[in-house]
Image (tube, grey):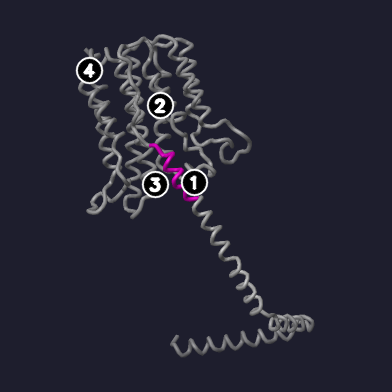
């Protein structure tokens, strides 16, 4: 079909459509046509100009007042949210748990976990569950850091649950602590999304976990190689999970100009590394004899230094740039480097223990 024929057919169809529309219009009831004319006349007589001029006069009279109100609201929001959140934000790796000078007959890992819970819940403000009325609601990095710290404590209680040298009372206390630590970190007063009614806050549940850990340490604990192996296996599993999480973020989002989720992953991992570092320090005290007997002191100090570096690594701005980028760093890769160092140390320690027990 040539162009001229196509336009001829198009013109014919348009004429037919116009005739059909005219016929339908003539069939409209007379009263509808009359109402339409009346409405059109009213709209023509409606004095829009007078209304616009009236609005302008009112706006001139109240504009100064509104400027003052808006300025006052802006200043209040700035001071309350921006300065308030800066005052609340506290991401640091000090103070750290201080080990006693003399080894006691208690599990120092439990004391350290109790210290970490108190550090994040009471010594600081627990920010992951705060509603919008609090200035810390706008914080992003501190909540993830705190969640990471509590996650490291929760994973360690999961390991201690399987320790062999425990009394029935200790088993019950560590079981209760583990259940309380599995409570969601973002509950303030209301229950979870999709449900109604009041619920215990995350702070209250974690305080209960701390009390259970203190009760656990009212009785003696005797370290064993089997318990040390259980702890190492859980730490191995946790480090692999963190590394995989960072790798997934790098693979899926490093091509983006701005990865807004990279800092969430980074600070959650950093908080976990800090908690794992503190707990590992106390584990070194609890299992000191086993570490010396298996000649793994070098690997153990390598593990501690790797976790410490992962916890202390703190860039001004977290970037997840492409791997071959000349203009941006990838801080998740640097963090993974320290985590993989720690994982290598854990694997070497486990291998040495297995080799020695094999003979």
The residue that label 1 is drawn on is 80
Residue 355: mark: 4
Q: CA distance from mark 4 to mark 3?
A: 42 Å
Q: CA distance from mark 2 to mark 1?
A: 29 Å
Q: Earlier in the sequence, mark 1 or mark 4?
A: 1
Residue 87 horizontal/vertical position (percent): 43, 40
* Quadrant placement of the C terminus: top left
Callout 2: few (<14), some (14-19), or many (20+) C-alpha neighbours within 10 Å? many
Residue 261: mark: 3
Q: Are marks 2 and 3 in contact (CB under 8 Å)?
A: no
Residue 116: mark: 2
Q: Nearer the viewer, residue 335 or 171?
A: 335
Question: What is the secondary structure assignment of the residue under circle 3?
Answer: loop
Q: Earlier in the sequence, mark 2 or mark 3?
A: 2
**What range is drawn magenta here?**
77-90
Q: Earlier in the sequence, mark 1 or mark 3?
A: 1
């Amino acid at each position: 079909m040539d162009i001229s024929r196509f336009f001829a057919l198009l013109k014919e169809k348009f004429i037919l459509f116009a005739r059909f529309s005219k016929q339908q219009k003539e069939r409209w009831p007379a009263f509808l046509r009359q109402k339409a004319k009346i409405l059109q006349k009213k709209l023509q007589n409606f004095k829009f100009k007078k209304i616009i001029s009236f609005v302008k006069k009112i706006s001139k009279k109240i504009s100064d007042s509104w400027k003052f109100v808006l300025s006052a609201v802006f200043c209040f929001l700035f001071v309350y949210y921006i300065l308030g959140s800066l005052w609340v934000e506290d991401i640091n790796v000090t103070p750290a748990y201080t080990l006693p000078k003399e080894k006691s007959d208690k599990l120092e890992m439990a004391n350290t976990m109790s210290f970490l819970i108190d550090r994040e819940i009471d010594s600081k403000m627990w920010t992951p569950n705060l509603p919008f009325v609090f200035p810390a609601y706008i914080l992003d990095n501190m909540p993830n850091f705190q969640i990471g710290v509590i996650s490291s404590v929760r994973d360690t209680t999961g390991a201690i649950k399987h320790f062999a040298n425990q009394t029935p009372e200790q088993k019950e206390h560590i079981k209760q602590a583990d259940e309380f630590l599995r409570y969601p970190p973002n509950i303030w007063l209301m229950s979870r999304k999709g449900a109604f009614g009041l619920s215990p806050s995350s702070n209250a549940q974690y305080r209960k976990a701390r009390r259970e850990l203190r009760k656990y340490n009212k009785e003696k604990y005797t370290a064993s190689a089997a318990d040390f192996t259980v702890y190492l296996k859980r730490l191995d599993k946790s480090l692999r999970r963190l590394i995989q999480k960072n790798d997934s973020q790098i693979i899926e989002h490093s091509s983006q100009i701005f990865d807004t989720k990279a800092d969430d992953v980074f600070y959650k991992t950093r908080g976990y590394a800090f908690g794992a570092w503190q707990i590992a320090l106390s584990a070194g005290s609890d299992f000191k004899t086993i570490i010396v007997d298996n000649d793994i002191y070098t690997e153990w100090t390598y593990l501690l230094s790797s976790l410490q570096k992962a916890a202390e690594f703190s860039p001004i701005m977290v970037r997840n740039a492409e791997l071959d980028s000349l203009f941006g760093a990838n801080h998740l890769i640097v963090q993974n480097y320290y985590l993989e160092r720690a994982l290598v140390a854990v694997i070497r320690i486990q291998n040495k223990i297995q080799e020695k027990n094999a003979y």
